[in-house]
Amino acid sequence: MPRRGRMLVAGALVAASVALGAGVSSGEPPGDPGADFGLTHRPVCPPAPEAAARCHAQVVTTASGGEAQPLATATYTKGYAPAQLRAAYNLVTAGSATQTVAIVDAYDNPNAETDLAAYRAQFGLPACTTANGCFRKVDQRGGVAYPRGDVGWGQEIALDLDMASAVCPGCGLLLVVADSNSFADLAAAVDRAATLGASAISNSYGAREFSTETSWESHYNHPGVAITVSSGDSGYGVEFPAASRYVTAVGGTSLTIASNARGWSETAWNGAGSGCSAYVPKPAWQTDTGCARRTVADVAAVADPATGVAVYDSYGSTGGANWFVFGGTSVAAPIVAAVYALAGNAASIGPSYPYGHTASLYDVTLGTNGRCSNPKTAPAVGYLCTAKVGYDGPTGNGTPNGTGAF
């Protein structure tokens, strides 16, 4: 189960607050984001039934007794801002309007466009609206018969749009809302995003593997389009569609400021999904020897709620407290999709590309997301759940260092 009770270590939160003060040209948080009360986090989407997916967003909450409530404020005070994310991953260009990042999620957030405008205005990003042609929202058929709203998936939508904006502020955004969280509807939405010209498609959802999952892989196989999928938030274990051979499976890290040449440090997040698929054959471009089938993940980005990101969402808030802090591999998937869009190479590359360009990735060598082997009897598969030099399950080949691996 997701780690509802995981406490945000005060030191990590203070480190995050220091990072938040660096390089902000607008929207700098006032005061110390590390408040004097306990913090935890919880998933925003409930467990899904069979043949359906759960979103991977984790919202930071207050621990004030009883059911913890989301930590929400009326003004931006907490969470990494676009300038920090771009600095952490050495992303120096704004991207091109010829590139479109598609976000696929279930249900609707009727405030998606206005909330996106508020986020971008806070951080001095250019407007991205229906009126100026930068933003488009469609249902899974390409029309405007949107499904019912859902607060949990609505927060996922807000998170995904904000992260794509943070990393590629010059890119176009396409939001495709599926009728439900069934794989039938989500797969149709992915197909729709591809037919509408998306350069990259971000999917921040998944389900534990199931025996018929390979029958859905064709919907995630769109040559010339980079498709990213979050690896999951329940620690060691594989989910679909991250296990598909046709996607870039994105794991998760904890990201903090550091006194090294990069200025940042990352370790594997203990909630990130990883492992060896039970059903999907191994693609030729994976050469790790501890898994005979598809290994998850391929790359990674920040996902730990303890080092979470700022998100603006009025649909899931009350009393005008619209600023939240989110984590989960739902953060990482749209970040990496936006890096693909920044690189502008999706038309000619596939998910194998990062494996041949590891010099343009930050290797994550510390951290674990669970126990995947007995070190006395099967030490060779320890990399499936423990970060190490080179490829490992929780962080794949590493995190973006510029756009050269994408």
Image (cartoon, rainbow, N blue to C red):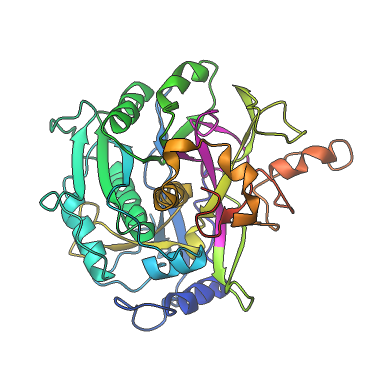
Q: Nearer the viewer, residue 176 or 195?
A: 195
Q: Residue at x 65, y 55 (%)?
A: 359
Q: Residue 383: x, y in percent?
A: 74, 44
Q: Residue 263: x and y, percent?
A: 57, 74
The one of 133 and 150 positioned closer to us in this rendering: 133
Q: Toward the viewer: 304 or 164?
A: 164
Placement of 330 over or under 34, stated as above or below: above
Q: Quadrant of residue 372?
A: top right
Q: Is residue 231 visible?
A: no
Query: In the displayed image of the protein, which residue is found farthest to the front?
Result: 348
Q: Position of residue 227 (x, y in %)?
A: 43, 37
Against 179, residue 232 (above or below) is below
Image coordinates of residue 99 in percent, x first then y, are 32, 47
Residue 251 located left or right of residue 387: left
Residue 155 visible to an observer of this rendering: yes
Which quadrant of the figure has residue 392?
top right
Seen at 47% across and 51% down, the residue is 332
Left or right side of 15 for 325: left
Magenta residue check for 243? yes
Residue 137 is inside the magenta segment: no
Which residue is most to the right?
Answer: 376
Left or right of 320 on screen, residue 155: right
For the record, the magenta segment spans 226-254
